[in-house]
Image: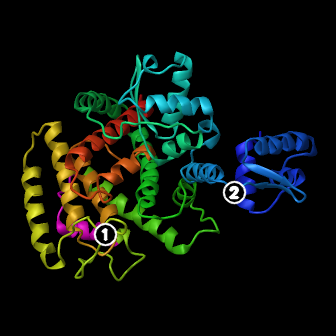
């Protein structure tokens, strides 16, 4: 069934008036659907989103219409069903829920069945961490999509953007479940990794500005089909990053120790579409676009600082028995130190994520993706931050790891 938001997206994208018959034809519907479509068009006029002219229905280019179109496009790129989210009651629930670090049905004024439905919607699209099922307790991830959704529905909202909750006990419990379940079905585990891998490629490269959507990424890497509308350089970037990830997964599964040579190889694989810089330490200065406060090592000091970092890494590797807290603290330090050294002209952040994943997986902590809902938060504590945010990144990393474990265990169980 075609919804009013489907019609809105079509007409907005068309950039010209459309008559009901045009809309019916574009959606490949029958003449029987004409009156339903016409009713939806009139409804969009009543909502102040469309206006009717002698040429047909067109978008009334207001700020509200722009916000709505932005929400829809954000959803489409990330394979999120906007028809689930674009509901005033759902937005009202979010406006209350985001004021708390974690929620149960008792914390928001909705029926328990409705609460469960809303959490399941958010969980489907990587927008929530389901901490427990009985009782149902969850942490909703605040990001720009949910922010704009609330703005569209005119909800003035206060949210908790920084979390103080430590999830070490929950992670350790899920790790024990994971170890038991993996032994029972290694084949299924490998299949799950494959799906996570493709999703991570999309999420990681979307942070770097690659315009390819999540569905297109699956088509390229899983179905081996390249949509005709894509630029070859963007496609090559996706394929090359997959090669780098596959090498990292192989190395971490074999417990290979990281070194400068291995990291240069990851970068070379990931950046083959720019051969002049692939696998090469920079000799000039660089900066983060949009964040001039992000401090990076002077080119002449890169080798010295990398040597110091890897001396710390070797000491870490030699310590066989470390608490979860110490492993996560070192992973965060390693991530931020490498990113601030910024040894390459481009491709530093995607390489940083690879080596952090390698470090954690080598310690038998399965982490294969950053959920959609945490991408904004992760970015704000890494290259989007004006200063080192090791403590906040550690809290974010805990949510990322717990989310991965929950998803994997759910599939394995």
Magenta-drawn stretch contains 260: yes
Secondary element under disc 1, as helix, strand or loop, is helix
Residue 185 appears anywhere in the view: no
From the top left corner, tell me how far across and down residue 100 is, in percent: 38, 29
Name the quarter where the C terminus is drawn: top left
- Residue at 53% of width from left, 19% of height from top? 110
In space, the residues marked 1 and 2 are separated at their CA atoms by: 44 Å
Above or below: residue 44 compared with residue 216: above
From the top left corner, tell me how far across and down residue 37 is, in percent: 84, 43
Above or below: residue 127 compared with residue 67: above
Tell me the crowding category of disc 1: few under 14, some 14 to 19, or many 20 or more residues within 10 angstroms, Cα based. Answer: many
What type of secondary structure mainly makes up the magenta span?
A: helix
Secondary element under disc 2, as helix, strand or loop, is loop
- Residue at 55% of width from left, 52% of height from top? 74
- Rendered image quadrant of residue 298: bottom left
- Residue at 30% of width from left, 37% of height from top? 163
Residue 276 appears anywhere in the view: yes
Name the quarter where the N terminus is drawn: top right
From the top left corner, tell me how far across and down residue 199 is, in percent: 46, 51
From the top left corner, tell me how far across and down residue 249 is, in percent: 32, 54
Q: Which residue is denoted by mark 1 in the rendering?
A: 267
In-front residue for pair 126/232: 126
Q: From which residue to which does the magenta span run?
A: 255-268
Q: Which residue is denoted by mark 2 in the rendering?
A: 61
């Amino acid at each position: 069934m075609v919804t009013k938001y489907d019609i809105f997206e079509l007409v907005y994208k068309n950039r010209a008036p459309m008559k009901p018959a045009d809309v019916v034809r574009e959606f490949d519907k029958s003449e029987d659907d004409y009156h339903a479509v016409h009713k939806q068009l009139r409804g969009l006029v009543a909502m102040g989103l469309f206006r009717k002219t002698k040429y047909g229905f067109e978008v009334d280019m207001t700020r509200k219409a722009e916000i709505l179109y932005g929400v829809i496009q954000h959803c489409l790129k990330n394979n999120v069903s906007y028809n689930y989210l674009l509901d005033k009651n759902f937005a009202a629930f979010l406006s209350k829920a985001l004021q708390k670090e974690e929620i149960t049905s008792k914390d928001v004024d909705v029926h328990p069945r409705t609460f469960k439905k809303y959490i399941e919607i958010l969980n489907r699209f990587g927008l929530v961490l389901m901490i427990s099922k009985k009782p149902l307790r969850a942490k909703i991830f605040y990001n720009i999509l949910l922010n704009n959704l609330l703005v569209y529905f005119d909800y003035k909202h206060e949210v908790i953007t920084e979390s103080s909750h430590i999830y070490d006990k929950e992670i350790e419990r899920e790790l024990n479940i994971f170890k038991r379940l993996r032994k029972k079905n290694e084949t299924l585990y490998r299949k799950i990794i494959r799906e996570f891998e493709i999703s991570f490629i999309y999420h990681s490269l979307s942070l770097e500005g690659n315009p390819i959507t999540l569905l297109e990424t699956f088509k390229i890497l899983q179905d081996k089909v390249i949509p005709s509308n894509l630029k070859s350089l963007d496609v090559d970037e996706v394929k090359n990053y997959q090669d780098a990830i596959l090498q990292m997964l192989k190395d971490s599964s074999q417990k290979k120790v990281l070194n400068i040579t291995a990291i240069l190889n990851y970068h070379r694989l990931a950046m083959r579409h720019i051969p002049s810089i692939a696998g090469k330490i920079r000799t000039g200065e660089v900066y983060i676009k949009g964040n001039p406060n992000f401090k990076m090592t002077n080119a002449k000091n890169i080798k010295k600082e990398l040597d110091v970092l890897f001396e710390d890494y070797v000491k870490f590797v030699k310590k066989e028995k470390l608490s979860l807290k110490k492993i996560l603290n070192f992973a965060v330090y390693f991530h931020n130190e490498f990113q601030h050294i910024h040894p390459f002209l481009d491709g530093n952040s995607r390489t940083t994520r690879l080596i952090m994943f390698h470090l954690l997986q080598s310690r038998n902590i399965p982490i294969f993706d950053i959920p959609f809902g945490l991408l904004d938060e992760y970015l704000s504590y890494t290259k989007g931050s004006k200063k080192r945010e090791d403590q906040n990144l550690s809290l974010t990393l805990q949510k990322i790891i717990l989310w991965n474990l929950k998803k994997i265990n759910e599939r394995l169980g």
